[in-house]
Every structure is written in structure tokens, then in C-alpha cells.
Amino acid sequence: MNSPVREWAFVLYPEGRPGEVESDRFDRSDALAGGEIGWEEDPGVVRAARAEDAVAWAVERLAEAGIGIADVPAAT
């Protein structure tokens, strides 16, 4: 049985502080064009059945844009 799809909001910490190049890459990335992923001051939501699925989806999209993730804190 499939779990119902929910909306997830979470914070991922990049490997380094984004500079102008990374910000431009983020803004122009086809992988991030859907608007689900945004900078912390402009967050979006990711729809998935489980939080783990939502985080994995976001990490993949960021990797496609050349933005590595250093940490994914556990939800409390």
C-alpha cells in the first residue's frame, strides 16, 4: 500500500557558503526550476510520501545544479 503524499519543508546545509557563482547556478538550474527548492529566506515545499523521499529528491536536484550538501539534520 502506498503512503499518501504529504508536503515537506526542511533545511539542507550546503558544503560552503554560497557565493555569486553558486547563487547564479542555483537561479539558472533546470533541475531547480520547479520552485520546490529555495533559499532559506524563500522556502518551498516538496511533495512526497515520506520525509526521507523528499530529502533525497531535493539532494539529487541540488547535486544536478552542482551544489553539494554537507549535512541533513534529523528532525526533532
Image: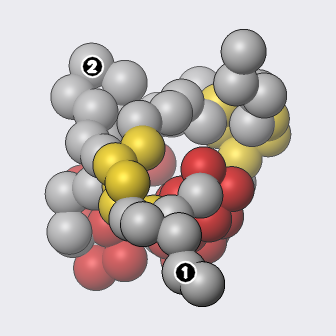
Whole-percent x and y of residue 56? 65, 64
Between 50 and 71, the residue placed more toward the observer is 50
Q: Local crowd at mark 1 within 10 Å, few (<14), some, or many (≥20)?
A: few
Question: Disc number at residue 2?
Answer: 1
Q: Nearer the viewer, mark 2 or mark 1?
A: 1
Whole-percent x and y of residue 35? 20, 57
**Identity of the residue drawn at 21% across and 28% down:** 42
Q: Quadrant of residue 32?
A: bottom left
Whole-percent x and y of residue 68? 69, 54
Left or right of 9? Residue 30 is: left
Q: Quadrant of residue 38?
A: top left
**Identity of the residue drawn at 68% across and 56% down:** 52
Tell me the distance, in whole angstroms, between the alpha carbons under discs 2 and 1: 33 Å
Left or right of 46? Residue 71 is: right
Disc 2 designates what residue?
41
Whole-percent x and y of residue 55? 61, 54
Establish if 12 lies above or below 61: above
Q: Which amino acid lies under the numbered mark 2 shown in the image of this protein?
A: Glu
State the quadrant of the C terminus. Answer: top right
SS for dot 1: loop
**Identity of the residue drawn at 37% across and 24% down:** 40
SS for dot 2: loop
Tell me if residue 22 can be seen: yes
Left or right of 67? Residue 43 is: left
